[in-house]
Image (cartoon, rainbow, N blue to C red):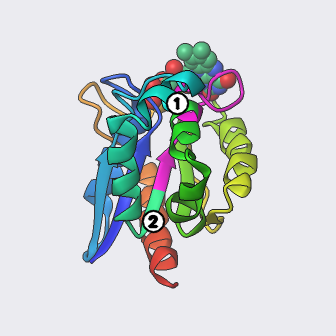
């Protein structure tokens, strides 16, 4: 069984990015399991908090999910043409202490996708992630690019992905990433 972890960068209950991961979970091929994690409960990074109390439980729990997975999909919204602060904050916590970076990032396979109501489907946020992921020395999958634009038209009121072309692209994305993640 290939174990993938999808991390949604949005805290919204009806987030398009969380909905995209839920659709990916349904479309995963046989032998591939996709668990979805959100960033609820992760405080703002504060060096004093870290010095006094160590790594918050929500961060440690997410680290463990990452370490237990074969590959991680970051579902990133785009805010002001870049990475949302909520998601960057989580990655910053996950990179502490620096001795954990190797196990949490450098030994891991990552991919990025995203959905937005605009016509450009998070293209700038996805590009902004590249410099962060390069710094953390992840094994990055650049074999697929999924930019879901006009998200309010492809998801219905129940957060279900209705657009057949997007479903097919998502199916291929998950399949390709799962193959890459297990290729070693
Ligand atoms: C946005 N949004 C947005 N969309 C986009 O395509 N490019 C952008 O630069 C921005 N900028 C931006 C800034 C801020 C502060 C907010 C709150 C929103 C719109 C954004 O894509 C939209 O809110 C999505 O619905 C967010 O993703 P979730 O929460 O649906 O997953």
Mark 2, residue position? 71
- Give the structural element (helix, strand or loop) at label 1: helix
Residue 132 appears at what percent x and percent y? 70, 47
Q: Is residue 158 visible?
A: yes
14 sits left or right of 169 in the view: left
Q: Quadrant of residue 101?
A: bottom right
User: How would you rate the neighbour count of disc 2 (Cα within 10 Å): few for under 14, some for 14-19, many for 20 or more?
Assistant: many
The residue lying toward the viewer, choosing from 21 and 129, is 129
Q: Residue at x 38, y 28 (%)?
A: 15
Mark 1, residue position? 51
Residue 9 appears at what percent x and percent y? 47, 35
**Is 14 above or below relative to 143?**
above
* Pointer 1 or 2: first along the chain: 1
Specify whether tag 2 is near ligand 1 (CB below 8 Å): no
The residue lying toward the viewer, choosing from 51 and 35, is 51
Q: Residue at x 64, y 32 (%)?
A: 83
- Give the structural element (helix, strand or loop) at label 2: strand
Residue 123 appears at what percent x and percent y? 68, 41
How many numbered circles does the render carry?
2
Q: Residue at x 56, y 51 (%)?
A: 112
Magenta part of the protein: which range? 73-88
Residue 177 appears at what percent x and percent y? 49, 69
């Amino acid at each position: 069984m290939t174990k993938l972890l999808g991390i949604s960068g949005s805290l919204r209950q009806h987030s398009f990015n969380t909905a995209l991961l839920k659709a990916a979970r349904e479309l995963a091929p046989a032998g591939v399991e996709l668990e979805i994690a959100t960033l609820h409960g992760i405080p703002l990074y504060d060096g004093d908090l870290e010095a006094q109390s160590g790594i918050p439980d929500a961060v440690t729990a997410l680290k463990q999910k990452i370490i237990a997975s074969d590959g991680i999909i970051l579902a990133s919204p785009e805010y002001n043409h870049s990475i949302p602060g909520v998601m960057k904050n989580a990655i910053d916590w996950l990179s502490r202490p620096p001795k954990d970076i190797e196990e949490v990032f450098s030994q891991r396979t990552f991919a990025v996708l995203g959905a937005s109501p605009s016509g450009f489907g998070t293209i700038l946020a996805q590009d902004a992630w590249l410099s962060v992921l390069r710094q953390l020395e992840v094994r990055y999958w650049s074999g697929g690019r999924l930019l879901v634009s006009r998200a309010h038209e492809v998801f219905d009121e129940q957060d279900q992905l209705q657009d057949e072309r997007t479903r097919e692209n998502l199916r291929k994305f998950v399949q390709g990433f799962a193959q890459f993640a297990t290729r070693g």
